[in-house]
Image (spheres, rainbow, N blue to C red):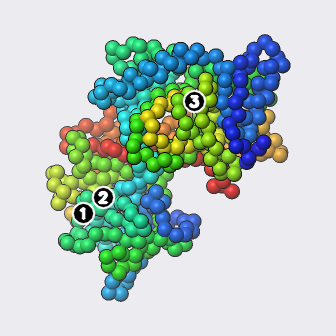
Amino acid sequence: MTMSSFQTIPVVDITHLGGTDTQKHEAVVDEIRKAAENVGFLTITGHGIDPAIISELIAATKAFFALPEAEKMKVYIGNSRNHRGYVPEGEEVFASGTKDKKEAFDVSIDLPANDPDYLAGNPLLGPNQWPEGNPDFRRAVMTYYDAAFALGGRMVRGFAEALGLAPDALDRFFTKPPSQLRLIHYPYDPNAPEDQPGIGAHTDYEAFTLLLPTAPGLEVMNGEGEWIDASPVQGGLVINIGDMLEVWSNGRFTATSHRVRKVKEERYSFPLFYSCDYWTVVEPLAPFVTPNSPRAYEAVTAGEHLHAQTVQTFTYLKARLARGEVTLPENSRSLSSYGQEAKRKAS
Amino acid sequence: MQANKAVPVGDIAQETAPERGAPRIEDLGGVWQRTLLIEPDGGVDQTSEVYWLQLGTLCGDIRSAPDQNCHAAFAGILSSRDEIFHWSPRWAYGLEEGAPPDEGYLRWEGAILREDGVHAAYVEHWRRLATPGDDDFACWLTDGSGNPKGLLLRIGRFAFCAHEQDGAAEETEFRLFTHGEDGWGLAASTPGHALTGVTLTWPEVLRICGAEYAEAESSAGSAGSGRRHLKIEECI
Protein backbone atom coordinates (compact mmCIF):
# COMPACT_ATOMS: atom_id res chain seq x y z
CA MET A 1 0.00 0.00 0.00
CA THR A 2 1.28 3.46 -0.85
CA MET A 3 0.06 6.92 0.01
CA SER A 4 -1.45 7.14 -3.45
CA SER A 5 -3.62 4.07 -3.18
CA PHE A 6 -5.00 3.52 0.33
CA GLN A 7 -8.72 2.86 0.45
CA THR A 8 -9.22 2.24 4.17
CA ILE A 9 -7.94 3.62 7.46
CA PRO A 10 -5.76 1.01 9.21
CA VAL A 11 -6.84 -0.16 12.66
CA VAL A 12 -3.97 -0.65 15.09
CA ASP A 13 -4.38 -2.32 18.47
CA ILE A 14 -1.89 -0.49 20.68
CA THR A 15 -2.39 -2.63 23.77
CA HIS A 16 1.26 -3.69 23.72
CA LEU A 17 2.73 -0.28 22.81
CA GLY A 18 5.26 0.49 25.53
CA GLY A 19 4.64 -2.89 27.14
CA THR A 20 7.14 -5.46 28.37
CA ASP A 21 6.67 -7.87 25.47
CA THR A 22 9.30 -6.46 23.13
CA GLN A 23 8.20 -8.45 20.11
CA LYS A 24 4.59 -7.33 20.40
CA HIS A 25 5.65 -3.77 21.13
CA GLU A 26 7.77 -3.69 17.99
CA ALA A 27 4.93 -5.15 15.95
CA VAL A 28 2.73 -2.24 17.07
CA VAL A 29 5.45 0.28 16.24
CA ASP A 30 5.76 -1.27 12.80
CA GLU A 31 2.03 -0.91 12.21
CA ILE A 32 2.15 2.71 13.37
CA ARG A 33 5.02 3.35 10.98
CA LYS A 34 3.18 1.87 8.01
CA ALA A 35 0.04 3.86 8.83
CA ALA A 36 1.93 7.13 9.37
CA GLU A 37 3.96 6.76 6.19
CA ASN A 38 1.27 5.44 3.89
CA VAL A 39 -1.97 6.93 5.16
CA GLY A 40 -1.32 9.58 7.77
CA PHE A 41 -4.34 8.26 9.64
CA LEU A 42 -4.92 5.28 11.90
CA THR A 43 -7.65 4.12 14.23
CA ILE A 44 -6.29 2.86 17.52
CA THR A 45 -7.95 0.31 19.75
CA GLY A 46 -6.64 -1.07 23.01
CA HIS A 47 -5.80 2.49 24.04
CA GLY A 48 -6.78 1.97 27.64
CA ILE A 49 -9.10 4.93 28.17
CA ASP A 50 -11.93 3.71 30.38
CA PRO A 51 -15.24 3.72 28.45
CA ALA A 52 -16.87 5.26 31.54
CA ILE A 53 -14.63 8.33 31.16
CA ILE A 54 -15.79 8.68 27.56
CA SER A 55 -19.46 8.22 28.50
CA GLU A 56 -19.20 10.89 31.19
CA LEU A 57 -17.48 13.27 28.79
CA ILE A 58 -20.25 12.85 26.23
CA ALA A 59 -23.01 13.22 28.84
CA ALA A 60 -21.42 16.34 30.36
CA THR A 61 -20.92 17.84 26.92
CA LYS A 62 -24.54 17.27 25.92
CA ALA A 63 -25.69 18.85 29.19
CA PHE A 64 -23.48 21.89 28.65
CA PHE A 65 -24.62 22.54 25.10
CA ALA A 66 -28.25 22.16 26.22
CA LEU A 67 -27.83 25.23 28.46
CA PRO A 68 -29.39 28.54 27.37
CA GLU A 69 -27.18 30.53 25.00
CA ALA A 70 -26.85 33.34 27.53
CA GLU A 71 -25.51 30.89 30.09
CA LYS A 72 -22.97 29.49 27.65
CA MET A 73 -21.91 32.97 26.59
CA LYS A 74 -20.78 33.68 30.14
CA VAL A 75 -17.71 31.65 29.21
CA TYR A 76 -17.44 33.03 25.64
CA ILE A 77 -14.03 32.38 24.15
CA GLY A 78 -13.66 36.07 23.36
CA ASN A 79 -13.51 36.73 27.11
CA SER A 80 -10.34 34.67 27.30
CA ARG A 81 -6.88 36.06 26.63
CA ASN A 82 -5.62 32.57 25.85
CA HIS A 83 -8.31 31.09 23.60
CA ARG A 84 -10.42 29.04 26.01
CA GLY A 85 -14.14 28.78 26.37
CA TYR A 86 -17.41 28.64 24.50
CA VAL A 87 -17.46 29.08 20.73
CA PRO A 88 -20.98 29.99 19.57
CA GLU A 89 -22.40 29.18 16.16
CA GLY A 90 -21.02 31.57 13.57
CA GLU A 91 -17.88 32.42 15.56
CA GLU A 92 -15.78 30.41 13.16
CA VAL A 93 -15.72 31.52 9.56
CA PHE A 94 -14.27 29.97 6.45
CA ALA A 95 -12.17 31.66 3.81
CA SER A 96 -15.28 32.06 1.69
CA GLY A 97 -16.79 34.15 4.47
CA THR A 98 -19.46 31.60 5.28
CA LYS A 99 -20.13 30.94 8.94
CA ASP A 100 -19.83 27.56 10.55
CA LYS A 101 -22.97 26.04 12.03
CA LYS A 102 -21.26 24.19 14.84
CA GLU A 103 -20.75 25.28 18.45
CA ALA A 104 -17.81 24.21 20.59
CA PHE A 105 -16.15 24.44 23.96
CA ASP A 106 -12.37 24.70 23.89
CA VAL A 107 -10.05 23.72 26.73
CA SER A 108 -6.34 23.09 26.91
CA ILE A 109 -3.61 22.59 29.46
CA ASP A 110 -5.11 24.25 32.55
CA LEU A 111 -2.43 26.58 33.86
CA PRO A 112 -2.73 28.79 36.95
CA ALA A 113 -3.37 32.51 36.59
CA ASN A 114 0.16 33.24 37.79
CA ASP A 115 1.75 31.13 35.07
CA PRO A 116 4.60 33.21 33.62
CA ASP A 117 3.63 32.55 30.00
CA TYR A 118 0.07 33.65 30.72
CA LEU A 119 1.28 36.75 32.54
CA ALA A 120 3.51 37.50 29.57
CA GLY A 121 0.46 37.55 27.29
CA ASN A 122 0.97 34.24 25.52
CA PRO A 123 -2.13 33.85 23.29
CA LEU A 124 -2.54 30.11 23.89
CA LEU A 125 -1.21 29.38 27.40
CA GLY A 126 -3.12 30.05 30.61
CA PRO A 127 -6.17 28.94 32.55
CA ASN A 128 -9.31 27.38 31.12
CA GLN A 129 -12.66 29.10 31.45
CA TRP A 130 -15.24 27.05 33.31
CA PRO A 131 -18.95 27.67 33.85
CA GLU A 132 -19.65 28.57 37.44
CA GLY A 133 -21.55 26.14 39.62
CA ASN A 134 -20.95 23.20 37.28
CA PRO A 135 -18.12 21.16 38.83
CA ASP A 136 -19.32 17.94 37.17
CA PHE A 137 -18.71 19.40 33.73
CA ARG A 138 -15.21 20.48 34.64
CA ARG A 139 -14.39 17.14 36.25
CA ALA A 140 -15.73 15.08 33.33
CA VAL A 141 -13.92 17.16 30.74
CA MET A 142 -10.58 17.28 32.53
CA THR A 143 -10.69 13.58 33.42
CA TYR A 144 -10.94 12.81 29.72
CA TYR A 145 -8.38 15.50 28.87
CA ASP A 146 -5.84 14.01 31.27
CA ALA A 147 -6.45 10.47 30.01
CA ALA A 148 -6.23 11.49 26.35
CA PHE A 149 -3.18 13.66 27.02
CA ALA A 150 -1.41 10.72 28.68
CA LEU A 151 -2.34 8.53 25.73
CA GLY A 152 -0.88 11.22 23.48
CA GLY A 153 2.37 10.94 25.39
CA ARG A 154 2.44 7.21 24.63
CA MET A 155 1.81 7.94 20.98
CA VAL A 156 4.65 10.50 20.88
CA ARG A 157 6.98 7.70 21.90
CA GLY A 158 5.36 5.34 19.42
CA PHE A 159 5.85 7.84 16.60
CA ALA A 160 9.45 8.46 17.67
CA GLU A 161 10.20 4.75 17.47
CA ALA A 162 8.29 4.46 14.22
CA LEU A 163 10.71 7.05 12.85
CA GLY A 164 13.64 4.96 14.03
CA LEU A 165 14.45 7.36 16.88
CA ALA A 166 14.89 6.63 20.56
CA PRO A 167 11.51 6.38 22.32
CA ASP A 168 12.11 9.61 24.23
CA ALA A 169 13.63 11.52 21.31
CA LEU A 170 10.62 13.82 20.94
CA ASP A 171 9.70 14.10 24.64
CA ARG A 172 11.59 17.35 25.08
CA PHE A 173 9.16 19.11 22.74
CA PHE A 174 6.14 18.29 24.90
CA THR A 175 6.73 19.74 28.36
CA LYS A 176 3.96 22.38 28.52
CA PRO A 177 2.09 22.14 25.24
CA PRO A 178 -1.08 24.10 24.44
CA SER A 179 -2.81 20.88 23.34
CA GLN A 180 -6.40 21.82 22.77
CA LEU A 181 -9.40 19.57 23.37
CA ARG A 182 -12.49 20.72 21.51
CA LEU A 183 -15.96 19.60 22.50
CA ILE A 184 -17.86 20.12 19.26
CA HIS A 185 -21.60 20.04 18.79
CA TYR A 186 -23.08 19.91 15.31
CA PRO A 187 -26.76 20.71 15.81
CA TYR A 188 -29.42 19.03 13.70
CA ASP A 189 -29.34 20.87 10.40
CA PRO A 190 -32.30 20.08 8.16
CA ASN A 191 -30.83 22.26 5.42
CA ALA A 192 -27.51 20.49 5.28
CA PRO A 193 -27.10 19.18 1.75
CA GLU A 194 -26.01 15.56 1.91
CA ASP A 195 -22.54 14.72 0.68
CA GLN A 196 -21.40 18.31 0.85
CA PRO A 197 -18.23 19.25 2.73
CA GLY A 198 -18.87 20.88 6.10
CA ILE A 199 -15.36 21.60 7.27
CA GLY A 200 -13.37 21.87 4.06
CA ALA A 201 -10.14 20.09 3.25
CA HIS A 202 -7.37 20.93 5.67
CA THR A 203 -4.48 19.52 7.64
CA ASP A 204 -4.13 19.89 11.40
CA TYR A 205 -1.50 22.30 12.64
CA GLU A 206 -0.21 20.33 15.60
CA ALA A 207 1.94 17.19 15.96
CA PHE A 208 -1.07 14.89 15.66
CA THR A 209 -4.73 14.76 16.51
CA LEU A 210 -6.48 12.25 18.72
CA LEU A 211 -10.13 12.16 17.76
CA LEU A 212 -13.02 10.66 19.64
CA PRO A 213 -15.75 10.54 16.98
CA THR A 214 -19.37 9.71 17.64
CA ALA A 215 -20.75 9.60 14.10
CA PRO A 216 -19.63 9.22 10.48
CA GLY A 217 -18.63 12.22 8.41
CA LEU A 218 -14.83 12.27 8.45
CA GLU A 219 -13.18 11.75 5.08
CA VAL A 220 -9.49 11.45 4.28
CA MET A 221 -7.75 12.26 1.02
CA ASN A 222 -5.43 9.67 -0.45
CA GLY A 223 -2.50 10.47 -2.70
CA GLU A 224 -4.66 10.33 -5.79
CA GLY A 225 -7.01 12.98 -4.43
CA GLU A 226 -9.79 10.49 -3.67
CA TRP A 227 -11.86 10.96 -0.50
CA ILE A 228 -11.80 7.85 1.68
CA ASP A 229 -14.43 7.32 4.37
CA ALA A 230 -13.06 7.24 7.93
CA SER A 231 -16.13 6.11 9.84
CA PRO A 232 -15.61 5.47 13.55
CA VAL A 233 -14.72 2.01 14.83
CA GLN A 234 -16.46 0.94 18.05
CA GLY A 235 -14.21 1.80 20.96
CA GLY A 236 -11.56 3.23 18.69
CA LEU A 237 -9.90 6.63 18.55
CA VAL A 238 -8.75 8.14 15.27
CA ILE A 239 -5.26 9.59 15.05
CA ASN A 240 -3.97 11.70 12.23
CA ILE A 241 -0.55 13.12 11.57
CA GLY A 242 -0.35 16.90 11.87
CA ASP A 243 1.90 19.50 10.33
CA MET A 244 4.61 19.31 13.02
CA LEU A 245 5.27 15.57 12.62
CA GLU A 246 5.39 16.08 8.88
CA VAL A 247 8.06 18.74 9.32
CA TRP A 248 10.13 16.83 11.91
CA SER A 249 10.15 13.76 9.67
CA ASN A 250 10.96 15.91 6.61
CA GLY A 251 7.86 14.57 4.90
CA ARG A 252 8.29 10.88 5.74
CA PHE A 253 5.06 11.19 7.68
CA THR A 254 2.36 13.21 5.95
CA ALA A 255 -0.20 15.54 7.45
CA THR A 256 -3.08 14.07 5.53
CA SER A 257 -5.77 16.39 4.23
CA HIS A 258 -9.18 15.60 5.57
CA ARG A 259 -12.64 17.09 5.68
CA VAL A 260 -15.90 16.61 7.50
CA ARG A 261 -18.92 15.83 5.37
CA LYS A 262 -22.01 17.84 6.19
CA VAL A 263 -24.78 15.70 7.61
CA LYS A 264 -28.27 16.52 8.85
CA GLU A 265 -28.01 14.52 12.07
CA GLU A 266 -27.03 16.11 15.35
CA ARG A 267 -23.63 14.83 16.45
CA TYR A 268 -20.68 15.45 18.74
CA SER A 269 -16.96 15.21 18.13
CA PHE A 270 -13.96 15.44 20.46
CA PRO A 271 -10.59 16.14 18.84
CA LEU A 272 -7.52 16.59 21.03
CA PHE A 273 -4.99 18.53 18.99
CA TYR A 274 -1.74 17.26 20.43
CA SER A 275 0.62 20.19 20.15
CA CYS A 276 4.25 20.59 21.04
CA ASP A 277 5.49 23.40 23.29
CA TYR A 278 4.63 26.93 22.13
CA TRP A 279 8.19 28.08 21.52
CA THR A 280 9.39 24.87 19.88
CA VAL A 281 11.18 25.70 16.66
CA VAL A 282 10.01 22.87 14.47
CA GLU A 283 12.27 21.88 11.61
CA PRO A 284 13.30 18.65 9.95
CA LEU A 285 15.30 16.51 12.37
CA ALA A 286 18.86 15.74 11.32
CA PRO A 287 18.38 12.00 10.61
CA PHE A 288 15.80 12.81 7.93
CA VAL A 289 17.82 15.36 5.99
CA THR A 290 20.10 13.47 3.63
CA PRO A 291 21.55 14.01 0.15
CA ASN A 292 18.69 11.92 -1.20
CA SER A 293 16.14 13.66 0.98
CA PRO A 294 17.06 17.34 1.18
CA ARG A 295 15.47 19.61 3.74
CA ALA A 296 11.94 20.25 2.51
CA TYR A 297 10.58 22.61 5.17
CA GLU A 298 11.49 25.93 6.69
CA ALA A 299 11.65 26.20 10.46
CA VAL A 300 8.42 27.32 12.06
CA THR A 301 7.69 28.23 15.66
CA ALA A 302 4.96 25.82 16.67
CA GLY A 303 2.85 28.15 18.80
CA GLU A 304 3.10 31.04 16.37
CA HIS A 305 2.05 28.78 13.52
CA LEU A 306 -0.86 27.49 15.57
CA HIS A 307 -1.95 30.94 16.66
CA ALA A 308 -1.68 32.38 13.15
CA GLN A 309 -3.87 29.61 11.79
CA THR A 310 -6.34 30.05 14.62
CA VAL A 311 -6.61 33.79 13.95
CA GLN A 312 -7.67 33.03 10.40
CA THR A 313 -10.70 31.10 11.60
CA PHE A 314 -12.07 32.90 14.65
CA THR A 315 -14.09 36.08 14.26
CA TYR A 316 -13.10 37.46 17.65
CA LEU A 317 -9.40 37.00 16.89
CA LYS A 318 -9.80 38.63 13.48
CA ALA A 319 -11.37 41.59 15.25
CA ARG A 320 -8.39 41.78 17.63
CA LEU A 321 -6.14 41.69 14.60
CA ALA A 322 -8.16 44.46 12.97
CA ARG A 323 -7.98 46.59 16.11
CA GLY A 324 -4.22 46.18 16.14
CA GLU A 325 -4.25 44.32 19.47
CA VAL A 326 -2.45 41.32 18.03
CA THR A 327 -0.14 40.90 15.09
CA LEU A 328 0.95 37.79 13.27
CA PRO A 329 4.59 36.83 12.94
CA GLU A 330 6.11 37.47 9.55
CA ASN A 331 6.72 33.82 8.83
CA SER A 332 3.27 32.49 9.64
CA ARG A 333 2.21 30.10 6.95
CA SER A 334 -1.09 30.18 5.15
CA LEU A 335 -3.70 27.46 5.47
CA SER A 336 -3.06 24.27 3.53
CA SER A 337 0.69 24.77 3.74
CA TYR A 338 1.18 21.10 4.42
CA GLY A 339 -0.22 17.78 3.32
CA GLN A 340 -1.10 16.34 -0.07
CA GLU A 341 -3.07 19.38 -1.18
CA ALA A 342 -0.07 21.62 -0.69
CA LYS A 343 2.10 19.15 -2.52
CA ARG A 344 -0.41 18.95 -5.34
CA LYS A 345 -0.61 22.74 -5.54
CA ALA A 346 3.16 23.02 -5.55
CA SER A 347 3.65 20.41 -8.25
CA MET B 1 1.96 61.80 11.46
CA GLN B 2 4.84 62.22 9.04
CA ALA B 3 5.34 63.07 5.41
CA ASN B 4 3.66 60.43 3.33
CA LYS B 5 5.88 57.99 1.51
CA ALA B 6 3.09 55.65 0.59
CA VAL B 7 3.69 53.71 -2.58
CA PRO B 8 1.43 54.83 -5.42
CA VAL B 9 -1.30 52.25 -5.71
CA GLY B 10 -0.65 51.64 -9.37
CA ASP B 11 2.85 50.37 -8.63
CA ILE B 12 1.82 47.43 -6.49
CA ALA B 13 0.65 45.15 -9.26
CA GLN B 14 1.34 41.48 -8.79
CA GLU B 15 1.46 38.75 -11.35
CA THR B 16 -1.70 36.71 -11.35
CA ALA B 17 -1.81 33.18 -12.64
CA PRO B 18 -4.03 32.88 -15.71
CA GLU B 19 -7.50 31.56 -14.93
CA ARG B 20 -10.30 30.30 -17.11
CA GLY B 21 -14.08 30.31 -17.01
CA ALA B 22 -16.41 31.87 -14.45
CA PRO B 23 -15.15 32.46 -10.91
CA ARG B 24 -16.76 31.65 -7.58
CA ILE B 25 -17.07 34.35 -4.93
CA GLU B 26 -14.31 32.74 -2.90
CA ASP B 27 -12.03 33.08 -5.94
CA LEU B 28 -12.56 36.83 -6.00
CA GLY B 29 -10.88 37.71 -2.72
CA GLY B 30 -8.39 40.49 -3.19
CA VAL B 31 -7.89 44.01 -4.43
CA TRP B 32 -8.94 44.72 -7.98
CA GLN B 33 -8.06 47.72 -10.11
CA ARG B 34 -10.20 48.58 -13.07
CA THR B 35 -8.08 48.88 -16.19
CA LEU B 36 -10.82 49.47 -18.73
CA LEU B 37 -14.44 50.58 -18.94
CA ILE B 38 -16.35 50.48 -22.20
CA GLU B 39 -19.63 52.24 -21.62
CA PRO B 40 -22.91 51.33 -23.34
CA ASP B 41 -22.51 54.25 -25.76
CA GLY B 42 -19.08 52.99 -26.77
CA GLY B 43 -17.15 55.51 -24.73
CA VAL B 44 -13.93 54.25 -23.23
CA ASP B 45 -12.61 55.23 -19.78
CA GLN B 46 -9.09 54.20 -18.91
CA THR B 47 -8.25 57.08 -16.60
CA SER B 48 -10.57 56.84 -13.61
CA GLU B 49 -8.92 55.23 -10.58
CA VAL B 50 -11.28 52.45 -9.53
CA TYR B 51 -10.49 49.94 -6.79
CA TRP B 52 -12.65 47.08 -5.62
CA LEU B 53 -11.77 45.17 -2.45
CA GLN B 54 -13.37 41.80 -1.85
CA LEU B 55 -13.03 39.40 1.08
CA GLY B 56 -15.60 36.70 1.66
CA THR B 57 -18.89 38.24 0.68
CA LEU B 58 -17.96 41.75 1.86
CA CYS B 59 -16.88 44.31 -0.69
CA GLY B 60 -15.88 47.93 -1.04
CA ASP B 61 -15.53 49.96 -4.22
CA ILE B 62 -14.12 53.43 -4.59
CA ARG B 63 -13.84 55.47 -7.78
CA SER B 64 -11.83 58.63 -7.98
CA ALA B 65 -10.36 61.20 -10.29
CA PRO B 66 -6.60 61.82 -10.36
CA ASP B 67 -7.04 64.47 -7.62
CA GLN B 68 -7.95 61.60 -5.24
CA ASN B 69 -11.44 62.94 -4.56
CA CYS B 70 -13.78 60.07 -5.08
CA HIS B 71 -16.89 60.65 -7.14
CA ALA B 72 -18.52 57.35 -6.36
CA ALA B 73 -18.13 54.61 -3.82
CA PHE B 74 -20.06 51.87 -2.15
CA ALA B 75 -19.69 49.12 0.40
CA GLY B 76 -21.80 46.05 0.93
CA ILE B 77 -22.22 42.46 -0.07
CA LEU B 78 -21.45 40.50 -3.21
CA SER B 79 -23.66 37.55 -3.98
CA SER B 80 -24.16 35.33 -6.98
CA ARG B 81 -26.86 33.25 -8.58
CA ASP B 82 -26.13 31.09 -11.54
CA GLU B 83 -23.58 33.08 -13.54
CA ILE B 84 -24.70 36.52 -12.39
CA PHE B 85 -22.88 38.46 -9.66
CA HIS B 86 -24.87 41.00 -7.73
CA TRP B 87 -23.36 43.88 -5.77
CA SER B 88 -25.65 45.08 -2.99
CA PRO B 89 -24.47 48.44 -1.69
CA ARG B 90 -25.41 48.97 1.93
CA TRP B 91 -23.69 52.34 1.88
CA ALA B 92 -23.24 54.36 -1.28
CA TYR B 93 -22.00 57.72 -2.46
CA GLY B 94 -22.42 59.29 -5.85
CA LEU B 95 -24.31 56.40 -7.42
CA GLU B 96 -27.11 57.19 -9.80
CA GLU B 97 -30.52 57.29 -8.15
CA GLY B 98 -32.95 54.69 -9.48
CA ALA B 99 -30.27 52.85 -11.43
CA PRO B 100 -30.93 49.20 -12.27
CA PRO B 101 -29.39 46.55 -9.98
CA ASP B 102 -25.63 46.38 -10.14
CA GLU B 103 -25.28 42.97 -11.73
CA GLY B 104 -22.70 41.56 -14.04
CA TYR B 105 -21.31 38.42 -15.59
CA LEU B 106 -17.74 37.73 -14.53
CA ARG B 107 -15.27 35.56 -16.34
CA TRP B 108 -11.54 35.14 -16.52
CA GLU B 109 -9.68 36.22 -19.58
CA GLY B 110 -6.19 35.10 -18.69
CA ALA B 111 -5.10 37.19 -15.72
CA ILE B 112 -7.86 39.74 -16.40
CA LEU B 113 -11.30 39.47 -14.83
CA ARG B 114 -13.88 40.64 -17.32
CA GLU B 115 -17.25 41.99 -16.21
CA ASP B 116 -20.14 42.32 -18.62
CA GLY B 117 -23.17 44.24 -17.43
CA VAL B 118 -26.50 42.46 -17.17
CA HIS B 119 -28.77 45.51 -17.29
CA ALA B 120 -26.51 47.75 -19.38
CA ALA B 121 -24.07 46.85 -22.13
CA TYR B 122 -20.86 47.90 -20.37
CA VAL B 123 -17.61 46.00 -20.15
CA GLU B 124 -15.04 46.33 -17.39
CA HIS B 125 -11.60 44.77 -17.06
CA TRP B 126 -10.20 44.16 -13.59
CA ARG B 127 -6.59 43.46 -12.66
CA ARG B 128 -5.83 41.84 -9.30
CA LEU B 129 -3.32 43.82 -7.24
CA ALA B 130 -3.34 41.69 -4.10
CA THR B 131 -4.80 38.47 -2.77
CA PRO B 132 -5.88 38.00 0.88
CA GLY B 133 -3.18 36.79 3.25
CA ASP B 134 -3.15 35.35 6.75
CA ASP B 135 -3.55 38.66 8.52
CA ASP B 136 -6.12 40.24 6.25
CA PHE B 137 -9.73 40.76 7.24
CA ALA B 138 -13.10 42.22 6.46
CA CYS B 139 -15.15 43.45 9.41
CA TRP B 140 -18.42 45.15 10.13
CA LEU B 141 -18.29 48.41 12.02
CA THR B 142 -21.22 48.54 14.42
CA ASP B 143 -22.67 50.95 16.96
CA GLY B 144 -22.11 48.43 19.76
CA SER B 145 -25.70 47.23 19.68
CA GLY B 146 -25.15 45.10 16.62
CA ASN B 147 -26.36 47.72 14.14
CA PRO B 148 -24.03 47.91 11.11
CA LYS B 149 -22.59 51.38 10.60
CA GLY B 150 -19.83 50.59 8.15
CA LEU B 151 -17.29 48.17 6.75
CA LEU B 152 -13.55 47.83 7.15
CA LEU B 153 -11.39 45.72 4.86
CA ARG B 154 -7.64 45.23 4.85
CA ILE B 155 -6.03 43.18 2.13
CA GLY B 156 -2.30 43.28 1.63
CA ARG B 157 -1.15 46.89 1.33
CA PHE B 158 -4.69 48.16 0.90
CA ALA B 159 -7.32 49.16 3.41
CA PHE B 160 -10.83 50.42 2.76
CA CYS B 161 -13.44 51.75 5.08
CA ALA B 162 -16.96 53.05 4.82
CA HIS B 163 -18.48 54.50 7.95
CA GLU B 164 -21.54 56.51 8.78
CA GLN B 165 -21.08 59.96 10.24
CA ASP B 166 -23.33 60.67 13.19
CA GLY B 167 -25.26 57.49 12.55
CA ALA B 168 -26.67 58.63 9.24
CA ALA B 169 -26.26 56.35 6.22
CA GLU B 170 -26.50 59.29 3.83
CA GLU B 171 -23.47 60.83 5.54
CA THR B 172 -21.22 57.84 4.98
CA GLU B 173 -17.57 58.51 4.32
CA PHE B 174 -15.41 56.24 2.17
CA ARG B 175 -11.64 55.96 2.15
CA LEU B 176 -8.93 53.90 0.55
CA PHE B 177 -5.50 53.66 2.18
CA THR B 178 -2.32 52.11 0.88
CA HIS B 179 0.71 51.03 2.86
CA GLY B 180 4.08 52.34 1.81
CA GLU B 181 7.58 52.09 3.20
CA ASP B 182 6.80 54.05 6.35
CA GLY B 183 3.14 53.43 6.97
CA TRP B 184 -0.34 54.02 5.67
CA GLY B 185 -1.32 56.84 3.38
CA LEU B 186 -4.66 58.04 2.09
CA ALA B 187 -5.09 57.12 -1.57
CA ALA B 188 -8.70 58.15 -2.15
CA SER B 189 -11.50 59.62 -0.13
CA THR B 190 -14.90 61.20 -0.26
CA PRO B 191 -14.37 64.99 -0.52
CA GLY B 192 -13.34 67.15 2.37
CA HIS B 193 -10.39 65.31 3.89
CA ALA B 194 -6.99 66.88 3.43
CA LEU B 195 -5.06 63.88 4.61
CA THR B 196 -2.91 63.34 1.60
CA GLY B 197 0.80 63.67 2.17
CA VAL B 198 0.85 62.23 5.66
CA THR B 199 1.86 58.83 6.93
CA LEU B 200 -0.48 57.10 9.33
CA THR B 201 -0.17 54.28 11.80
CA TRP B 202 -2.82 51.56 11.77
CA PRO B 203 -4.52 52.96 14.89
CA GLU B 204 -4.67 56.33 13.13
CA VAL B 205 -6.30 54.68 10.12
CA LEU B 206 -8.86 53.12 12.45
CA ARG B 207 -9.51 56.44 14.15
CA ILE B 208 -10.09 58.12 10.78
CA CYS B 209 -12.48 55.30 9.94
CA GLY B 210 -14.37 56.01 13.16
CA ALA B 211 -13.42 52.61 14.55
CA GLU B 212 -12.12 51.48 17.90
CA TYR B 213 -8.39 50.84 18.03
CA ALA B 214 -5.71 49.50 20.33
CA GLU B 215 -4.23 52.33 22.40
CA ALA B 216 -0.79 50.78 22.12
CA GLU B 217 0.35 47.72 20.23
CA SER B 218 2.00 46.35 23.34
CA SER B 219 -1.09 46.46 25.52
CA ALA B 220 -2.93 43.39 24.30
CA GLY B 221 -6.55 43.28 25.32
CA SER B 222 -6.94 47.01 25.91
CA ALA B 223 -8.82 48.24 22.90
CA GLY B 224 -9.57 51.92 22.62
CA SER B 225 -12.91 52.43 24.24
CA GLY B 226 -13.90 55.93 23.21
CA ARG B 227 -17.68 56.07 23.33
CA ARG B 228 -18.05 57.36 19.79
CA HIS B 229 -15.87 54.73 18.20
CA LEU B 230 -17.58 52.09 16.14
CA LYS B 231 -16.97 48.53 17.24
CA ILE B 232 -15.12 46.12 14.99
CA GLU B 233 -17.16 42.93 14.84
CA GLU B 234 -18.13 39.91 12.78
CA CYS B 235 -14.79 39.77 11.03
CA ILE B 236 -13.95 37.29 8.34
| Residue that carries the numbered disc 3 in the rendered image | A211
Q: Determine the residue positioned at 49% across, 51% down.
A: B133
Image location (x, y in percent) of residue A342: 63, 50
Does the residue at mark 1 contact the one at mark 2 (Cβ under 8 Å)? Answer: yes
In the rendered structure, which amino acid carries the disc numbered 3? Answer: Leu
Rendered image quadrant of residue B41: bottom left
Q: Are marks 3 and 2 on the same chain?
A: no
Crowd rating for badge 1 (residues with CA inside 10 Å; few <14, some 14–19, many 20+): many
Q: Determine the residue positioned at 36% across, 60% down.
A: B78
Q: Determine the residue positioned at 76% across, 24% down.
A: A28
Chain label for disc 1: B
Chain label for disc 2: B
In the rendered structure, which amino acid carries the disc numbered 1? Answer: Ala
Lower position in the chain sequence, tag 1 or tag 2: 2
- As drawn, the label of residue B44 is none
Chain label for disc 3: A
In the rendered structure, which amino acid carries the disc numbered 2? Answer: Gly
